[in-house]
Amino acid sequence: MLSTGLPRGAVPKLDRPGPLRDRVYEALLELITTRALQPGQHLVESELAGHLGVSRQPVREALQRLNTEGWVDLRPAQGAFVHEPTEEEADQLLTVRTLLEAEAARLAALDATAEKVGALVELCAEGERAVAADDVDRAVALNAAFHAKVMELAGNAVLAELAAQVDRRVRWYYTPVARQRGRQSWIEHRELIVAIADRDDERAAHLMRIHTEHTRRSYHERNGS
């Protein structure tokens, strides 16, 4: 097996506009956050270049950028490896996520309308269907979309900008527990929607706090730790 060990069909297409190095960066980051490239996995420039259909130069540049951002570790005389987050790293980020999203849920409830609630209901129904079909990748994507919609409905640009900075890592940490959280996560989403629809800002914030705490706890317990 190749060092990169990519699952069949996992490689994103590089057909979006923009500099090649940026498209390669986005493709590799997507492979990391979806865990098609696993934490600790050796990343070989030539193999990645072959998978993506590009030369080694944009891959090298992308790996250097990913290293700067903490997604990849460059080890002297060994090469590049997907970063393995420590329990402390995950805990700190997921704790910050709870603070941001609880406030977003509170603000979303204060300005709730039937149309806004309907968008959340639709995303929730899609997520439930993905879980029923055991489509983990789609469930993870829809979970991110649901939380992003709550953040959007909060109507606070600064809050949204801060949330965007942690969103990719939240997906990274959520993916290995998505099946474990499964249906329960979407039940919690339904309860949150009711609080937002009722314009009960305190309850919405409380439910979001509990919901994100469940994900944080599931992450730490994923290997029986």
Image: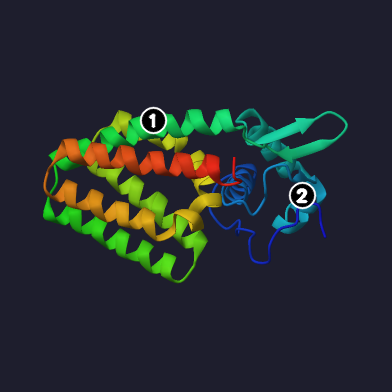
Residue at x-position 52% and y-position 51%: 177
Of 209 and 1, the residue lying toward us: 209
Sequence order check: which comes first, mark 2 or mark 1?
2
Q: Which numbered circle lies on residue 204?
A: none
Identified by mark 2, the residue type is Ser
Residue at x-position 37% and y-position 62%: 127
Q: Position of residue 74 (x, y in %)?
A: 76, 32
Identified by mark 1, the residue type is Leu
Crowd band around label 1 with a 10 angstrom C-alpha radius: few (<14), some (14–19), many (20+):
few
Residue at x-position 44% and y-position 58%: 182
Q: Position of residue 70 (x, y in %)?
A: 62, 31
Q: How is the image coloured?
A: rainbow
Q: Determine whether 129 is above or below 70 in the image.
A: below
Residue at x-position 61% and y-position 56%: 14
Q: Secondary structure at mark 1?
A: helix
Report the residue marked by disc 1.
162
Q: Position of residue 54 (x, y in %)?
A: 73, 53
Q: Residue furthest front?
A: 224
